[in-house]
Image (cartoon, helix red, strand yellow):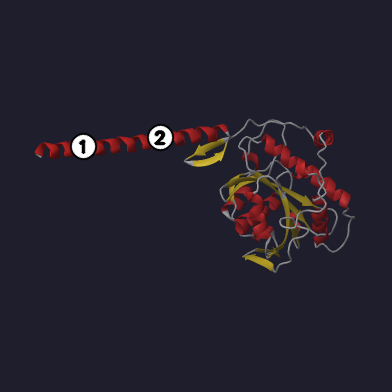
Amino acid sequence: MRCENNRLTDLGQGSVKIKEINEESQLLDWFSDFEEMDSVLLQDGVEFNNGHPMVKSQAPSITFKNLGEFIKYLEENNCDDIEVSPCSKSHTFNRPVSTPRLIIKPTWCVYGNSLNTEFFFSCLKDKTCGDIIVDHFEPLVSTPTDFLLSKGGQRILDTPNAGGSSVWSEVLSFEVLNHVFGAQLRKTETEIEYAPGSKITDFSVDINNSHIGVSVVRIINFFDLNGRTYKAVFTPEYARNLLYKKLFGVIASTEAVVEKWEKQILYVWTTSSCVADIIVQEYWKVPAKLRSNTLVYVNHATNSEFLF
């Protein structure tokens, strides 16, 4: 009986050892599976930085040297896929009318459709298509030096850009993106690296852990600075040409940038709500290949001479 008990004890210890071996094998298999997953992810273009997945940098390149080459490519490949009637769920034409939202900061305010924030983040999540959103910007100070700036905005202001007089439009573009949508400045214009001879972007940001490029454009010379008197007629044709040019620039800089971003925002400043309306209408007549996955964010600014 004693021998049998010892035998039973030995069997019990053996079963424990077998169980431990099985658990160890399962653990090794589990880690092996993770190593295989990491290998697949890296092959599919994902790198890890401090344990966080990030888009793997591909070699910067320049496929099309100018807009003409890109348009020729669209024509030769039957890519003139114009969408005049966008879907009702995500596109501007058929969006539901909603109560306006007002975002007030100490030295400026932004207001527009209360659903614009939702549309903004929905577009950022969708890496396959673009969108267009319009808000109104109103300064609460008379001179730009009175603006209270975030650290990112002050950094853009203090860092020399690649030329031009657009510094305040870039600074305030970041301020709105920062305070309204939570953007954090990543790199300024001269800190971003590209393939030689490429188009460039004004700055890059992080929004909800996504790396986003931001290109800023001002529409001037059509209205006086309070938006009430015509200087020239802003035609649909001009709007379309502007969109073609700027959207191509976004695509080109995205392809040529060294540290890849996931999407770009084309930030458009105008002094007239009429111009904003025309831009929205013409945006959906631009080929989808040119709209790409760019989010066009239009701000109609009043009392903002320093921007233009």
Residue 250 lies in quadrant: top right
Left or right: residue 240 compared with residue 97: right
Query: Identity of the amino acid at label 2?
Result: Asp
Residue 113 pos. (x, y %): 71, 64
Q: Residue at x 56, y 31 (%)?
A: 43
| Cα distance between the residues tagged 1 and 2 | 26 Å
Q: Residue at x 87, y 52 (%)?
A: 236
Outermost residue toward the front?
1
Comes first in the chain, label 1 or label 2: 1
Residue holding disc 1: 11
Return the residue nearer the eye: 112 or 231.
Answer: 112
Tell me if I can see residue 297 in this picture.
no
Residue 62 lies in quadrant: top right
Left or right: residue 147 compared with residue 232: left
Q: Look at the picture and state if 2 lies above or below 304.
A: above
* Front: mark 1 or 2: 1
Residue 97 pos. (x, y %): 74, 66
Q: Which mark is residue 280?
A: none
